[in-house]
Image (cartoon, rainbow, N blue to C red):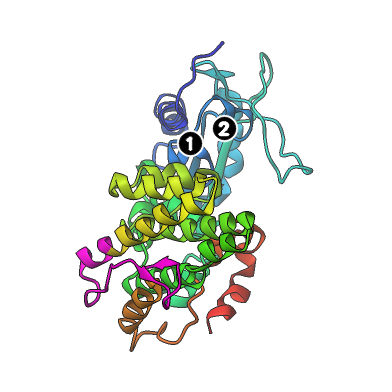
Amino acid sequence: MTEFIKGKELCRDFFHQIAQPCIARHFPRLRYSSGLLGYGSDILGYDDPVSTDHMWGPRFYLFLQEEDEGLQPQLEEIFSREFPYQFRGYSVHFSPPDPNDAGVRHAEPLSQGRVNPLVFFYTVDSYLDFYLGTHQLEQLTSIQWLSLSEHRLLALSLAEFYTDQLHMAQRLEKIRYYPQDVWLYLLASNWYLAAEEQAFVKRCGSTGDELGSALACSRIADRLMRLGFLYCKRYAPYSKWFGRAFQELPLPQDLKEAVKTAVLAGSTQQREQPLVYAQQRMAHLHNQLGLTEPVSEEIVPYFGRDISVIFADRIAQAIRRNLVGTPLEKTPLIGTLSQVPNFTNLYEDVGRRPQVEQLYR
């Protein structure tokens, strides 16, 4: 059995040892960029042997200048003829796209004939149009930022280029992280959305609705975790990797443990205290950063009831005051669709971005 190799290492070595010399032999004057970016658990460094069953293996993106797009058939022919059948124990040959599975391709063993490698050809602009829905990264408005998939922004921020004569990495610097007003808006949104249910964990439990209490707790925990990504200025991945990436954030360990304890608790009594403590710790982090005037971190009864809260809505209001005079001053505090895990059909469909933008107008 082939020893597992992380995809980033495999693809990097494949390009430098196989593809780059091949291109240099046949097109010594070609100016291009190449690397690994976009889809895939290997981009995040989370790939494992299970990941190898589809769209994983020796692969790379090749970005051409517009005037060189006509060379693609020749490059494909050369790659097909000269690439090896295997590299470091992994097949270089892939099946045709499966029309019944969103065009997914699978590595297939091959011992004769021509290789069909997993190489993606684009110009820089055409790739950005395909992946984000726009190549005009310097001109993104605040509302356009909110219509972009956060996971896709993350995947582009982690791009690795093997050669970059077209300066694509410099282009991507424009979306390294959210601009200040969008960042503040997302912070305010997540505090506001957490506050919407801050009393429900205990209230549901007091009526005997443990299931409702657990669900409300999970939703608040999700918002707290997203606040963790925001305060650390890291894009959050989609749900498959969300919990793992949260654990890797440079946040206080007791805060992470409090969130985990609350979500895994078996009763309202066990989940209320760690959940409100996690909110308190996140509020303390907010105050440490000095983004607004200091906000109370005190845990208090909810309007005199036997329910503990920190009044998270006060933090949302304090942040929102910093949005006065920006395009997002009056935008409803709903966050982004990327923060609703089951809405992938909306936020991953770049063709729907104009419709998504209407939510914020």
Circle 1: element type: helix
User: CA separation, marks 2 and 1?
Assistant: 8 Å
> Picture coordinates of residue 84 (x, y %)?
55, 19
User: In the displayed image of the protein, which residue is found farthest to the top?
Assistant: 1
- Quadrant of the rendered structure where residue 301 is? bottom left
Task: Tell me if 214 is positioned left or right of 169 in this view.
Answer: right
Give the camera-side residue of 129 and 196: 196
> Picture coordinates of residue 35 (x, y %)?
43, 41
Q: Label 2 crowding class (10 Å Cα cut-off): few <14, some 14-19, many 20+?
A: many
Q: Is the magenta stretch mostly helix, strand or loop?
A: loop
Q: Work out whether mark 2 precedes mark 1 in sequence or the reverse, and give the earlier one.
A: 1
Circle 2: element type: loop
Looking at the image, do the residues carrying marks 2 and 1 touch, with CB atoms under 8 Å apart? yes
Q: Relative to residue 86, is residue 60 depicted above or below?
A: below
Image quadrant holding the N terminus, namely top right
Task: Tell me if 95 is positioned left or right of 71 in this view.
Answer: right
Please give the name of the residue rendered at 60% of the width and 31% of the height, measured from the top-left corner. 117
Q: What are the residue bounds of the magenta stretch?
A: 284-309
> Picture coordinates of residue 153 (x, y %)?
45, 57
Please give the name of the residue rendered at 31% of the width and 72% of the height, measured from the top-left corner. 180
Q: Which amino acid does label 1 sit on?
A: Asp
Please give the name of the residue rendered at 50% of the width and 59% of the height, measured from the top-left corner. 128
> Picture coordinates of residue 20 (x, y %)?
42, 31
Please give the name of the residue rendered at 37% of the width and 61% of the height, measured from the top-left corner. 279
Residue tagged 2: 56
Residue tagged 1: 42
Whether 11 is among the magenta residues is: no
